Amino acid sequence: MFNFNKKIIFFFLVFFISFFTNNVIYSQEVIKTNDIVKITTTPQNPAPGEAITANLSSYLVNLDTSKIVWYIDGIIKKEGIGEKSFTIKAKGVGQSTVVKVIISTKDGSKIETSVEVIPNTISLIIEPISYTPLFYKGKPSFTFEGQTKVVVMSEIINPITNKKISPDNLIFKWKEDGIVRGSSSGLGKNYIIIKSSIPIEDIFISVEISDTQNSFVLNTSKILQPSKPKVILYENSPIYGILYNKSLPLNYFLGDKEEIKITAEPFFFDKKENLLSRLSYFWEINNKPIEQPEIKNEIILKQVDKETKGTTHILLNTEDEDKLFQFTKNNIYINYGE
């Protein structure tokens, strides 16, 4: 009898433990990680005020069936099943936005991941090293077989001190068409000199920027497209000199003038010593080469008969004797007569 009662007590004890073990709801700790679930932002290096899309990805968690809650600076902004993306607006330079996500899976697990978005201003400034006339106020062009300086203009804020980091304290890793330019890379080297070589192709320039502690890595890139140099034709007035304020049009009416002096000015040829003395000018009038004028970049066309109508075609070819692809041409039609 005693043994029978002991068995009954043991049975109920096992049943009691089993029942409550299977039905109790445990207080599960939230797993905080950036490995199980990752947040990626596009663009990676946003500019101030730029729209940023944050996306969730995971190889271990089925995000499509999980409840996802998005927090921006601690405030819930979006939640729902399978909500794997969210778009926010970047703040000002150096101002942090914390994007946090809590994922609740179907099996009751909770996973938290976060990312901090700090916009910085990074841009590449192209400064071609090419020839322009003395009083030209425009920007030079990067031309075939020419050179250009590429400079990083940046406003990068230290997230700890909240102060702008000087370029002297940044490490710049330059690449040209995917190949590291070691001699141009290093601490404080915020510019690079690029040369257009043969064959003539677009040049892909990229730079990777980091601090000395390698606490962040920023990237930016640009495609350089070299173009042909130019030669512009101007009227050389006997009273006012060369009229640089307006180039000659393709069709020019001579009117009552007895003659017109045309001056050719080269633009964007490779800027180096004695450039003007190396340039050759080949003039043609109505498809016939003319003898080299005394001043090689000038030509004078005289009107013999003001009553006879006609057109004279002037063609000019200009080239750098030392550069195979540094050449260009221009032409003009001079109309005269009543």
Image: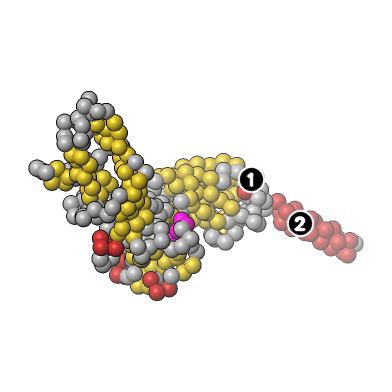
Residue 15, horizontal then vertical, whole percent = 79, 55
Asked if the stretch drawn in magenta spans residue 203, the answer is yes
The amino acid beneath tag 1 is: Asp
For label 1, count other residues whose C-alpha is less than 10 Å away and answer few (under 14), some (14-19) or many (20+): few
| Dot placed on the residue nearer the N-terminal end, 1 or 2 | 2
Going by the image, does 42 lie left or right of 229?
right
Seen at 38% across and 62% down, the residue is 323
Picture quadrant of residue 187: bottom left
Q: Position of residue 331 (x, y in %)?
A: 32, 43
- Residue where numbered disc 1 is placed: 64
As shown in the figure, which amino acid type bears the numbered disc 2? Ser
Labelled pair 1, 2 in contact (Cβ < 8 Å) = no
Q: Is residue 69 above or below residue 124?
A: above
Q: Nearer the viewer, residue 168 or 189?
A: 189
Residue drawn at x 38%, y 71% is 184
Which percent across, then down, holds residue 316? 32, 48
Kindly state the secondary structure of the residue where label 2 is placed.
helix
Closer to the camera, 199 or 128?
199
Left/right placement of residue 327 relative to residue 266 reads: right
Q: Main secondary structure of the magenta part?
A: strand
Residue 104 is left or right of residue 302, and the answer is: right
Q: What residue is shown with label 2?
A: 18
Residue bounds of the magenta highlight:
201-205
